[in-house]
Image: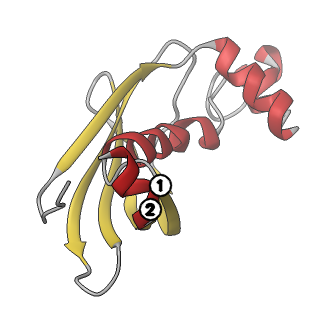
Amino acid sequence: MVIHVGDSARRTRTVTAEDIELFARMTGDRNPLHTDPDLAARSRFGGIVVQGGVTSGLLNAVVATDLPGPGSVFLRTDWSFRAPVRPGDTITAEVVVTAVRSDKPVTELRTTVTDGSGTVVLDGTAVVWRDPAVAAATS
């Protein structure tokens, strides 16, 4: 697959309380903002918020599976978290190719995650390298 500036891909997922628990078990991130409904309700967020890693993880899925595709790894990310994601929210992660290196398999992306109402919850950029052997075997 040849990648061009302007190419895009997206994935949508509804975040569940189970996602929060699985991420907490995997990483040890048991911040009360994610796990304690009573304490989170008293915070500026007014309730449970999903870990940023769960939100940005949907971008991992887009990059590793769709664009650039299998064999891709992040070299650099610059992400700003703009709004909270809550259990039950449906989020959409989108990447848009902004530059393609001609001398190596490196792609620059604009990255965005929005919630079901269209609010941008994460935005930024990423630089991705795609392993040529994996790319050739899966194309």
The reply, left or right, for residue 79 in relation to residue 125 is: right
| Residue 17 found in image quarter | top right
Residue 90 to residue 137: above or below: above
Residue 122 to residue 117: above or below: below
Q: Amino acid at mark 1?
A: Gly
The reply, left or right, for residue 6 in relation to residue 55 is: left
Q: Circle 1 — which element?
A: loop
| Residue 100 found in image quarter | bottom left
Q: Circle 2 — which element?
A: helix
For label 2, the crowd category at 10 Å Cα-Cα, with few meaning under 14, some 14 to 19 and many 20 or more, is few
Give the residue at x 45% y 55%: 134
Distance from label 1 to label 2 (Cα)? 8 Å
Label pair 1/2, CB-CB below 8 angstroms = yes
The reply, left or right, for residue 2 in relation to residue 134 is: left
| Observer-nearest of 58 and 118 | 58
Residue 27 to residue 78: above or below: above
For label 1, the crowd category at 10 Å Cα-Cα, with few meaning under 14, some 14 to 19 and many 20 or more, is some
Q: Which residue is mark 2?
A: 133
- Single out the residue that lies furthest toward the bottom: 103
| Residue 12 found in image quarter | top left
